[in-house]
Image (spheres, helix red, strand yellow):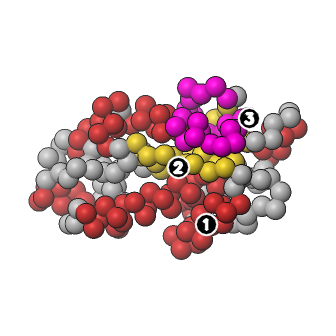
Amino acid sequence: MDKLEIEKGLLAKGYSLICGVDEVGRGPLAGPVLCAAVIMPLENLVEGIDDSKKIPAKKRESLAEKIAGAAIACRICAVDAATIDEVNILEATRLCMKRAIEALDPAPDFVITDGNMTLDISFPQMHVVRGDARSYTIGAASIVAKTRRDALMKEYAETYPGYGFERNMGYGTKEHVEAIKRLGLCPIHRRSFTSRWA
C-alpha cells in the first residue's frame, strides 16, 4: 500500500500544506479525548509511520519525536471528561480536531481526517476510513496523539492512584471497572460512560 497515494492526489490538484488529523481516546472511561493535527513535508519521509496502534510503545515514542522535529506544523488539543459529558464524545472529538487544526501555523490548505467525520472548518477537507493505516500524514498524527495521551494518562495515574491508568490508559479493563466499584469515580472519569458502576 502506498501511504502517500492520497497526498499525491492532493499535490496533483495544487495543494501543498496537507494536514492530517487523528484522535485517540474516544472509547475510554476516563481522561480526555486528544487530537493531533500535523502538516508533514512530503519528501525526506520519516520511516516507519503507520497506524499508531500497530507500533510498540518505545518505537512510537521515538517516531513521535522524529515527527515533531520534521513537521512543518504540529498541534495537539485535548477535550476533557466534563466537556465530553456535556456535549457527547462525537461532538467533543469534532471540537478537539477543529481546535488542533485552527491552531496550526502555517495554516493548512487541505485537511484529511481519520474516520468518517466532517468538521466545522473553513479549509477544504476529506475523511478517510482507516486513514491512520492508509495515509502517511494521518498516520503521523495518530502517533503524536497516542504518544501524548499515553504520557498524560501516566501522569494522571500518579494523581489518581488505584485505577491502573498507567496500564489501561483509562479504557474499561476489568481492573479499571473493579477499581471504580471499589474507589468510586475520580475527577477525570466520564460520568456518561461510567454510570452503570458508580
Report x, y in % for residue 97.
53, 39
Residue displayed at 70% across by 28% down: 124
Determine the CA span between mark 3 and mark 1. 24 Å
Q: Which of 77 and 111 is in front in this view?
A: 77
Report x, y in % for residue 76.
52, 49
Report x, y in % for residue 151.
43, 64
- Look at mark 3 in the image and give the residue it sits on: 109
Question: SS at mark 3?
Answer: loop
Magenta range is 98-123
The tag on residue 65 is 1
Question: SS at mark 1?
Answer: helix
Q: Is residue 28 above or below residue 178?
A: above
Question: SS at mark 2?
Answer: strand
In magenta stretch: residue 116: yes
Left or right, 102 with reference to 85: right
Residue type at tag 1 = Glu
Q: In this view, does 60 lie above or below 16?
A: below
Residue type at tag 2 = Ile
- Look at mark 2 in the image and give the residue it sits on: 76
N-term-proximal mark, 3 vs 1: 1
Left or right, 67 with reference to 166: right
